[in-house]
Image (cartoon, helix red, strand yellow):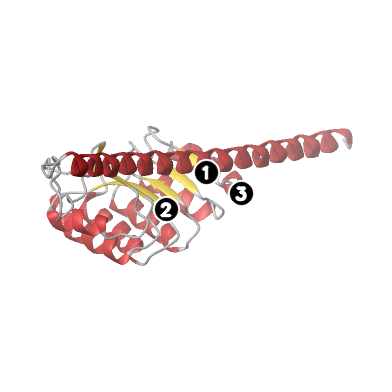
Amino acid sequence: RDADLLALAETLVDARVIDVSKNLVTSAGIETIAESAVALRDLDASRNRIGPRGAAALARLVATGTLDALDVSENPIGDKGTAALLGAVAADPPLEALALDCSDQSLGLLVDAVRANSRLVRLALCGLPFDVPRPDLVAAVAGHPRLAAVLVDGVPLRRPPSPTRSRCGGGGPESRIDVLRRRFDDLQTDVDADAAVLAQRRLYAEASLRRHVAAAHRTIARRHAAAASL
């Protein structure tokens, strides 16, 4: 919670991976993280109470170029908060994975951000009020140089079909094989992207754990030294 984050502000300086999902964190707590965790690479702040102010703090954090992955989905950041985050993404920071809520009103900004960005690998969108994404979003994703996995409310975004062949393989057995190969390649790309993100998070978590253990040992040593001098 926010009070816990304020109490731990000094220990957040060296943290590279932070998971505060489902912890009733508000904008104040996120501002503490954004201001204190200067080495942060991976932040999961999903399912909290973060508002537009907190989203603006996260947008500033994204703009610093330190974050590799950010999950701020299922938070009441509103269109104003979404706009702040998408504005940071459009500046093409090194961020590779992003999950956030997006309404129909923010979809145009999302399309612009995807078109301007060249580094995202994975994008997860929540809360869209329709089943089929707009064609301009599908086209923007298809034209992105690195965006391999896009989920809309947990469902992979469908890329546009090839203009020369039917998705159903109506051109005969040979075209059906091509369709199946393309679908397999898309699935393999999604799996590879997921594996890369998970491996990255594991490395950051292990490094963060080692730093926290070392800090705890130093604190214990200082306390023992202080007690011995009494």
Q: Is residue 184 above or below residue 86?
A: above
Who comes first in sequence, dot 3 or dot 1? Answer: 3
Q: CA distance from mark 3 to mark 1?
A: 17 Å
**Three-letter amino acid code at disc 1?**
Gln
Question: In terms of depth relative to the viewer, which is nearer, 131 or 54?
Answer: 131
Q: Is residue 182 above or below residue 56?
A: above
Q: Is residue 44 above or below residue 143?
A: above
Label 2: which residue? 96
Who comes first in sequence, dot 1 or dot 2? Answer: 2
Q: Position of residue 51 (x, y in %)?
A: 29, 48
**Three-letter amino acid code at disc 2?**
Glu
Label 1: which residue? 200
Question: In screen coordinates, is 165 left or right of 205?
Answer: left
**Residue at the location (19% across, 53% down)?**
138
Q: CB under 8 Å between callouts 1 and 2? A: yes
Residue 69 seen from this side: yes
**Residue at the location (42% across, 53% down)?**
96
Neighbourhood count class around disc 1 (C-alpha, 10 Å): few under 14, some 14–19, many 20 upward? some
